[in-house]
Each structure stands twice: as C-alpha cells, then as structure tokens.
Amino acid sequence: MSRQDTQGAAEAPWTARVLTVFPEMFPGPLGESLAGRALARGDWRLTVHDIRDAAEPPHRRVDDAPFGGGPGMVMRPSVADRAIRLVEGLEAGRHTLPLIYLTPRGRPLDQTMVAELAAGEGVILLCGRYEGVDERVLEAHGAIEVSLGDFVLSGGEPAALCLIDAVVRLLPGVMGNQTSAGEESFANGLLEYPHYTRPAEWTGSDGIPRRVPDVLLSGHHAEVGAWRLSEAETTTRIRRPDLWARYMRSQADAMTTPNPAPARRPAPQPAQHSDVAHRGKEPAEAPRSKDRQTA
Ligand code: ADE
C-alpha cells in the first residue's frame, strides 16, 4: 500500500538505505515471509550501498589503525563521509532521512523508537565493522547511535536487519491482522500473555497432561480479556521489573489525569515524538545506477 500525502498524491514508500561493506547480506531474511512479500508488493523499499565504492582505488582501503594504539581497525572518515554523501537525498550536505549508526554504544532500540521510525519516511543505516567508525564523521552528519542490546555483534548488519524487520511489520498494509500489532509485547508497555491452540489437553514428552486455561474455552470475551491482561501483568512484573515500574507509573498517571482513558485497559502507546524519525521531507529522486536497488 503506497502512502498518500495531504493532497492524496502517492508518496514514496518507506525506504531503508543501508551502507555496508557486505552488501550481499541484504535483503537476506528481509526477502522472505512478511517483510519479503511487502518488499515485492512495493510497501517498502530497500537500497543497499557498498561502502567500498566510496574508497579510493587502487587499494580501496576502508579502514586504518586507531590513533592511540590498540587492537582492531577504524573506518576512515573520508570513506564513510563519501559513502554517506553518495546516498541520494542529500540537501545542503545533510540527509533529510535520519542517519542511524548501529553500535553497542547507542541508545537501545525499543518499540517506541521502532514506531517513530515507521511513522517517518525511512532511514539511512550505517553498518560498522572493525572497531567502529571515526567519531568525527558521526558528528559531522549528526548520526543517531542505536544499539540492539548489551552484547557485541561482529558488525552492524544483523542489527540493521532486525531494525528494518521491526519497522516494516508496523507499516500500513504489511501485517494482515492489524490488531495483533496493538496487542503484542511492548505495544501497551507489557509483555504478551501466553497463547494456546488445539487440542484443549495435550501431553508432552514429560508425560504430564496440560490443559488450556478454562477461561479461554468459555467464549466469554470480557473474561478472556481480563485473564490476558492479568497474565501479561504477572509475566511483566516477574520477568521485567524495569518495564513493570514504568507501566505502574503510567497507570498512576492515567488515574490522576483529568478525563483519563480507562486505567486498566491495555491500549497501544502513542509514540513519543523525538528526532529519530524525521529530519524533513525527502525530495523526489531517481535511483542511482551504482546503488543496488532491491525493490
Ligand atoms: N554492532 C555490534 N554490536 C552491536 C549491537 N549490539 N547493536 C547494534 N550494532 C552493533
């Protein structure tokens, strides 16, 4: 489904532009299943840009030794800068799409940030390898540093794949069943309740018969809803005290705000606005021949 601007004219679909020294890693898993079908339909667009194309021949060196010594190599500022500038959409030396550099030093990716990005027009993702990218080029381009979590990957590419996957499934028309995005983990600040399907009683290899909770067989929608909320709250309280504390604060705020929404009802959280999704309007453009246009 293509988006429409205020005059009803079709806008470019949400676009991910990935800068990497391993372009063959894309679309990878994003070419399959939900994201892959949406890509084939044109619900979103992926362009992949080989950072090595921005390096000077004959050696095309992308990295150099770190000042101050130490292990590993650092991506050279001139190469990273040229690679970023070669991506279409530059206005007065800056991109209108947010430039995200994937690094364990970044702000942890969460569902709020994912929703903000999905509400924007797209993203440029700079994937680091080696020890990282020269700090000055990140400063010069106002890069937003984003982390997938407190662990170290061998490069930014798997993180870029995850970020794109999380955004794409929120784009209009991508998920067949729109209600499930609003009910899943994090959408209302809670982890998701448990799921069951047939048969109503099942015995696993441990020999213990297990029944589906009776309430789910009752056909009583209000009771099912109350049970699911209670399960979601219990799971969140036990597994994620950090999320639980935030949820409790938001419930308390809802009680004290005039004309509040019903307090104990799980509702999708509106994305809090930050600078992550928008830098301005991206101009119309023609694909550059050197970019690998995946869709
Ligand atoms: N690159 C290496 N590790 C990473 C992480 N945890 N998140 C994002 N990018 C990374």
Image (cartoon, rainbow, N blue to C red):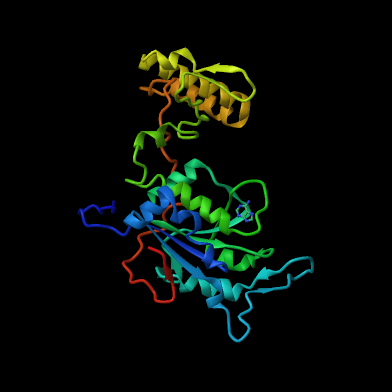
User: Residue at horizontal 66%, vertical 46%?
Assistant: 150
Image location (x, y in percent) of residue 206: 64, 23
> Is 109 rendered above or below residue 190?
below
Residue 146 versus residue 93: which sits nearer the camera?
146
Q: Residue farthest to the right?
A: 69
Image location (x, y in percent) of residue 54: 54, 77
User: Residue at horizontal 35%, vertical 22%?
Assistant: 259
Image location (x, y in percent) of residue 10: 24, 57
- Quarter, ligand 1: bottom right
User: Residue at horizontal 28%, vertical 58%?
Assistant: 11
> Is 270 rendered above or below residue 282?
above
Residue 4 versus residue 134: which sits nearer the camera?
4
How many marks on residues?
0
Q: Quadrant of residue 264?
A: top left
Asked if residue 142 lies left or right of residue 255, the reply is right
Q: Residue farthest to the bottom?
A: 58
Asked if residue 8 lies left or right of residue 266, the reply is left
Image location (x, y in percent) of residue 211: 52, 16
> Is 163 rendered above or below residue 66?
above
User: Residue at horizontal 52%, vertical 75%?
Assistant: 82
Image quadrant for the C terminus? bottom left
Q: Is residue 168 visible?
A: no
Q: Is residue 8 visible?
A: yes
Residue 170 versus residue 4: which sits nearer the camera?
170
